[in-house]
Image (cartoon, helix red, strand yellow):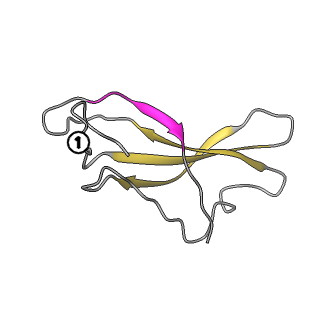
Amino acid sequence: MHSTAGGRPLQGAELVYFIAVGRTGEQTVGRVVGKATTGDDGVARYTRTHGVDGPTFSDERIDRHSVEYSPINKIDNVQYCRARGDAKLTAG
């Protein structure tokens, strides 16, 4: 959940979801798989209906999943800082 300095949920923040892919023994590269905006609860959820294997080649592996917030515009007259962290990936 993203929240303001006052602890309230941050609504309207656009987050970008990445996977890190690469060949065994080589450095991984981040690939964007989607975007989502936080709701009233400060949570953003992105659903990829075709899974995450599509952005990879047959000899690549998915190393990790992450999400990034890179604000360009202010939200409620506040300029927030860039943030990046691991993202939870569920399959179903």
> Residue at horizontal 25%, vertical 30%?
5
Q: Is residue 72 above or below residue 67?
A: above
Query: Which residue has dot 1 on it?
Result: 8
> Residue at horizontal 29%, vertical 34%?
72
Location of the C terminus by quadrant is bottom right
- Dot 1: element: loop
Q: Choose between 82 and 54: the one closer to the eye.
A: 82
Location of residue 90 by image quarter: bottom right
Q: Is residue 9 above or below residue 5?
A: below
> Residue at horizontal 40%, vertical 46%?
15
Q: Is residue 14 above or below residue 85?
A: below
Q: Choose between 30 and 77: the one closer to the eye.
A: 77
Q: Residues within 10 Å of mark 1 (few under 14, many from 20)?
A: few
Q: Choose between 40 and 75: the one closer to the eye.
A: 40
What percent of the width, then of the height, locates residue 55?
65, 56
Q: Answer whether residue 90 is magenta in the image.
A: no
Location of residue 66 by image quarter: top right
Q: Left or right: 10 with respect to 91?
A: left
Name the amino acid, label 1: Arg
What percent of the width, then of the height, locates residue 11?
24, 49
Q: Answer whether residue 84 is magenta in the image.
A: yes
Q: Left or right: 61 with respect to 66?
A: right
**Which segment did they paint magenta?**
80-86
What percent of the width, then of the height, locates residue 7?
25, 37
> Residue at horizontal 86%, vertical 35%?
25
Q: Left or right: 72 with respect to 22?
A: left
